[in-house]
Amino acid sequence: MDEISPKLQNQIAQFQQLQQQLQTVMGQKIRMDAMLKEMEMTIEELKKTPQDATVYRNVGSLMIKVADIPALLKELEEDKETTEVRIKSLDRQEKMLKEKFQNVQEQLSRAIGAQGAPLRMDAEDV
């Protein structure tokens, strides 16, 4: 097994690339889920807040007083919907990458098995 065929080298590179892509998508999804939870908590608290309460909003490193609470609530609801769509997209992307990852893993296992060394790595190990 001194020499690895170009085809096998290509499959290994593809495997590693898929692994990195899967890690990236999973990380993005975790961050988006956290953002969604924060938005949901913010919306719930804002709904409980009296209309005459003083509410501030972060804008960069500043806290700005909100003049129109219903408009802020509407904006947050829209942002929440957009985040939910992004999460669904990341779910689909993650599923597709896991399928590709498993297919390439099986191909590599067969190719490496034919050369004498088994390969075992699950998509969850990524």
Image (cartoon, rainbow, N blue to C red):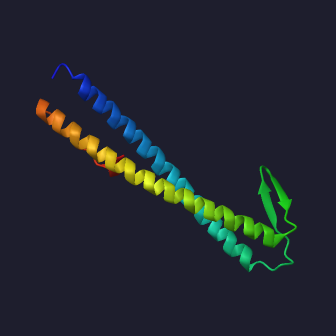
The quarter of the displayed image where residue 64 is located: bottom right
Expressed as whole percent of the image width and height from the top left, the position of residue 81 reads: 62, 64
The answer to whether residue 42 is left or right of residue 83 is right
The answer to whether residue 38 is left or right of residue 58 is left
The quarter of the displayed image where residue 54 is located: bottom right
Tell me which residue sits at (83%, 78%) in the image. Answer: 51
Is 12 or 100 nearer to us in this picture?
A: 100
Q: Is residue 12 visible?
A: yes
Number of disc labels: 0
Tell me which residue sits at (41%, 45%) in the image. Answer: 22
Is 5 or 49 nearer to us in this picture?
A: 5
117, above or below 47, in the image = above
Tell me which residue sits at (55%, 54%) in the image. Answer: 31
Q: Which image quarter is the N terminus in?
A: top left
Is 56 or 92 nearer to us in this picture?
A: 92
The quarter of the displayed image where residue 108 is located: top left
Expressed as whole percent of the image width and height from the top left, the position of residue 27 reads: 49, 49
Expressed as whole percent of the image width and height from the top left, the position of residue 102 reads: 28, 47
The answer to whether residue 57 is left or right of residue 101 is right
Q: Is residue 119 visible?
A: no
Expressed as whole percent of the image width and height from the top left, the position of residue 115 reads: 13, 30
105, above or below 26, in the image = above
The answer to whether residue 87 is left or right of residue 116 is right
Tell me which residue sits at (49%, 54%) in the image. Answer: 90
